[in-house]
Amino acid sequence: MTLAQRALERLQAWPDLMAGPASCGTGRALRSVRDEIVHFHSMRDVDLHLTRTAIQRFHYDLAGSSAIHLVPGSGWVTVHLDCEADINLLLSLVSIALKTHQTRPAGEEQRLAACNFHRVTVLPRDAAAGG
């Protein structure tokens, strides 16, 4: 079982999330009552609709993680799953995303709702470090 499959399996057990096809057309999605929250695009790459507000709030921490890839202006972050710790990071961020989506005004961010699929290239961590 891949890391993404393990993460998807764990998140599908959450009562606030429902599974379905990703609106971008690639992979599986988990959504809340209001919005798509997570897109599983490959065996390792997951897009998370964290929202621009949450990304701004946690930007320093997100930018410092080798598992997180940010796209300027996007309300989504791409999480690259290389190990079990990355799954735990994803689950923590999904919890933040759910809270953020529950408290934001309806209709906010709708024009920028497209995920990062095809907008980010993820390199393996050892290749990104030059080794």
Image (spheres, rainbow, N blue to C red):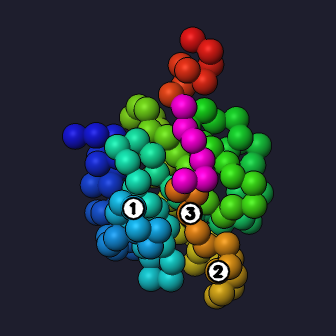
Work out whether residue 71 can be spotted: yes
Would you say 14 lies left or right of 75 here? Answer: left
Residue 115: give its label: 3
Going by the numbered disc 1, the residue's amino acid type is: Thr
Mark 3: secondary structure: loop
Q: How dense is the environment of label 2, judged by Cα within 10 Å: few (below 14), some, or many (20 and up)?
A: few
**104 left or right, relative to 81:** right
Front in this rendered view, residue 55 or 42 = 42
Per the rendering, the mark at residue 116 is none
Horizontal arrangement in the rendering, residue 4 relative to residue 124 (left or right): left
Q: Residue furthest left?
A: 1
Q: Is residue 129 above or below residue 35?
A: above
Find disc 1 in the rendering and name its residue: 26
- Type of amino acid at the residue the image marks with label 3: Cys
Tell me the quadrant of the picture where the N terminus can be found.
top left
What's the residue at 77%, 43% (across, down)? 60
Q: Quadrant of the C terminus?
A: top right
**Distance CA(mark 1)–CA(mark 2):** 19 Å
Please identify the residue farthest to the top as the structure is shown: 131
Q: Which residue is mark 2?
A: 110
